[in-house]
Image (spheres, grey):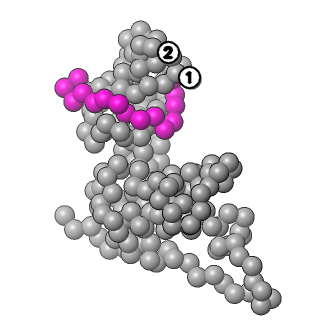
Amino acid sequence: MTAPTFPIGIDKTVTNIEATSGVFTLTLSDVNGILVGSRVDIGGLPTAAWNTLNETITAVDATLKTVQYSQGNFTVASQEVWGQLHLETTWATSADVENWLGFDATGDDQTFLDRCVDAANDRCWYYRSRAGYQDHPNVAPGNDVTLGVIMYAAQLYRQRGAVDGFASFDAQGFGVVPQQSLGQILALLGCKRPGVG
């Protein structure tokens, strides 16, 4: 049996699980980099209902190598397992992107915007890690990087329904190619240049 792998971020092996009234305690390979308030995904556990996305860590014990979060109303006897905990990147929020776009999303728009923000957070962490930076997924390295993530998420959102580039109305009747901002986003993220240790 193989634990699932998540493509971006920091992953930890889950070795033990128990729960009391929905408060889960996971024993991990290590808890380095996990903070109270970190958002995590859990996968590969033997019971499908225990696998979950977007949980918020409520407690971290570095001595016991455990983390806690609340999910449902499960009670689970302590048992050895083999799964994976993935630490999500949270450098920008949907509220940040709504502010940049100048509107409040609702319904399906909110769902799609949230997905764009999650994708931008993960992708920007990946861009910077490939450039040699060693950033914490839950702590943005600076306001410039946060703005880069916001701009990237907004660009992803604005491309909804478009074949290439931003969806737009061309009143002139001939193809004006919209200008992309990827170069500016990469500059804000500090990419296309190596990280300096």
Q: Position of residue 159 (x, y in %)?
A: 65, 67
Residue that appears at 56% across and 22% down: 49
Residue that appears at 52% across and 31% down: 52
Residue that appears at 22% across and 68% down: 196
**Which amino acid, mark 2?**
Phe
Q: CA distance from mark 2 to mark 1?
A: 9 Å
Residue 35 belongs to magenta span: no
Residue ranking furthest to the right:
173
User: Is 196 positioned to the left or the right of 156 in the image?
Assistant: left
Would you identify the image quadrant in which residue 161 lies? bottom right
The residue closer to the viewer here, 55 or 48, is 55
Determine whether 99 is above or below 61 in the image: below
Q: Secondary structure at mark 2?
A: loop
Residue 39 in sight from this viewpoint? yes
Disc 2 target residue = 74
Q: Are marks 2 and 1 in contact (CB under 8 Å)?
A: yes
**Which amino acid, mark 1?**
Ala
Label for residue 3? Answer: none
Magenta stretch in the rendered image: 50-64
Disc 1 target residue = 49
Would you identify the image quadrant in which residue 14 lies? top left
Determine whether 120 is above or below 137 in the image: below
Residue ranking furthest to the top:
77
Would you identify the image quadrant in which residue 149 lies? bottom left
User: Is 161 positioned to the left or the right of 3 in the image?
Assistant: right
